[in-house]
Amino acid sequence: MSMAPAQKRPRRWLVAAAAAGLLGALCVAPTSASAAETLVSQNKAVTASSSEWAGTPATAAVDGDNGTRWSSAFAASQWFQVDLGAATAVSRIAINWENAYAKAFTIQFSADGGTYTQAYATTTATGGQQSITVSGTARYVRINLTQRALEAYGYSFWEFQVFSGSVVTNPTNKLLSYAKPARASTEQNDVNCNPCTADKAFDNDPASRWATSSTTGWVDPGWIYVDLGASANVTQVVLQWDPAYAKAYQIQVSNDATNWTSIYSTTTGDGLKDVINATGTGRYVRMYGTARSGPYGYSLWEFSVYGTGGSPVDPPAKPADPSFPASRLVFADEFNGGNGAKPDTAKWTYDPGVPQNGEVQYYTPNSENAAMNGAGQLVIQAKKQDYEGRQYTSARMNTSNKFSVQYGRVEARIKVPKGNGLWPAFWMMGSDFLQGRPWPYNGEIDIMEILGRNTNELYTTLHAPAYNGAGGYGQKYTSGADLSQDFHVYAVEWDSKGMRFFLDNTLVFNAAKDTVENTRGPWIYDHQFYVILNLAVGGDFPGPIDASTPFPSQMLVDYVHVYQ
């Protein structure tokens, strides 16, 4: 019962774009480190109602390894409990579910392991990565599981994490480090990371990073500092680590970049996002690493300093978050043209050419592959047809250079085809791809992918430098209906806090920004994206076509709407 998104393959537009420096070689740590919020459950004593077998023990859910998991016996009523060792103020529970998640469960607290109080309850959970805010003091934290998502199995999660404390930010503080001069012990600037210079940690761009040199910088100590331009009262530092993180480091301040004073230190850093509430005064702020997490160097996607004073530069303002349900229509195509008419060129661009991901079709600009049917629908049609050296044709079209959006509800009503090797998709690409930023640094949002071999399953996935392709952040949702038999509405509601994916207004996956930053890596979706529709044939993800695959096959699109 491994996570199906692990089979996911990227929609590569530039083959070389998949190279992400050290990312492919390093192991991503599963938990966050924060001076204010502390993980208190890792490697603590655990008990459970059952285990499926010896390879999935209860201890695997608190070992800090997202590659090991606990799974229960195949029964509806199960429980899992962690002993924190002492009474602890609990603020948050994070659960990284395997496919066999619980639809209904409660979280309970106990001081003695005998009497319990309820801290949280749900009957509508959707699995994936859950972050649950709770409040109370407990030594024992228990999850009671009562309704299975997969009735043929039990329950399973990769990690069950209990946190204590919370981050409190002074609202008068502001970002002081954006676009300020920076220096580092060394910098990487080569084919694997070009450039990964010190300034990239302070550009407010979570898809660019600083890294120490791959030839001289994989040593201790390693450091990076920022010049705030004038003396500042520092109150908070936020580090978004690459997998090459520091196990031991200090945050230091200085008035002259020569004499440094430590305002925070740790020897138990565990990577990803560190939110450090520490105070000090100085013009310069430095991360001084003294113990690397592995054989590589140090690397940060972002190094953000907050406080008062300094000489701050305001970063570009983000648009306001929509209020959902969003009602202001900002883009619409009802596809009401005549039979055989091409889509509106003021809204859509054909994207012809050879495919990626091992697909076998050629995308053409021809109306036989993408045109309206006169009944209010766009027809994207895959055909068995010799064309440009390929034996199959289909179409891919997008709104690039026509329409892009940041935040809102993006939805389409679609009927997908059925057949081995068919791969319909409704998705979005970061618009900076059009200016030359390669995939996956621009970001990809897969609202709907369905494999023709099993049209009861819907995939929603996010791709970024730290999680992409087979390791994309996503969810497989199993529907009670065959999605090829009728039209269904596929949608994402997206704001600065995250994304929520829907099938016919049923929430199927929640990607919370904070959870992603604390468990997988940078959130790179706070910018413009454009919309894409396509029907692929064959490929790494859906598998090959065979004699049973029907041709022609049609993906019907009733409408595409975007609301803010």
Image (tube, helix red, strand yellow):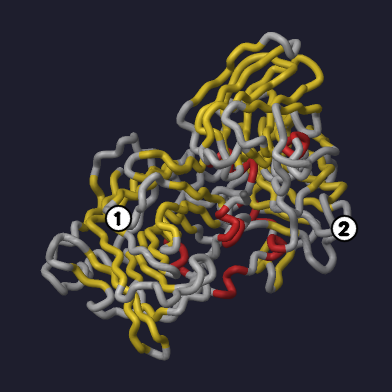
Identify which residue, 173 or 547, lies in the foreground: 547
Classify mark 2: residues with Cα within 10 Å, few (<14), some (14-19) or many (20+). some
Classify mark 1: residues with Cα within 10 Å, few (<14), some (14-19) or many (20+). few
Res. 394 image quadrant: bottom left
| Rendered residue at 38%/44% (across/down) | 502
Q: Nearer the viewer, mark 1 or mark 2?
A: 1
Identify which residue, 171 or 289, lies in the foreground: 289
- As drawn, which residue projects farthest toward the top? 115
- Say what secondary structure mark 1 lies in: loop
| Quadrant of the drawing holding the C terminus | top left
Res. 165 image quadrant: top right
Judged left or right of residue 403, residue 546 is: right
Residue tagged 1: 485
552, above or below 26, in the image: below
| Rendered residue at 41%/79% (across/down) | 361
What residue type is disc 1 on? Gln
Q: Earlier in the sequence, mark 1 or mark 2?
A: 2
Residue 460 is situated, as x and y percent measured from the top left of the image, at: 46, 52
| Rendered residue at 35%/80% (across/down) | 393
| Rendered residue at 87%/58% (across/down) | 219
Judged left or right of residue 473, residue 388 is: left
Q: Which mark is residue 373?
A: none
- Say what secondary structure mark 2 lies in: loop
Residue tagged 2: 219
Residue 425 is situated, as x and y percent measured from the top left of the image, at: 39, 61
Q: CA distance from mark 1 to mark 2?
A: 59 Å
2, above or below 308, in the image: below
Residue 235 is situated, as x and y percent measured from the top left of the image, at: 67, 30
Whether residue 383 appears in this view of the structure is yes
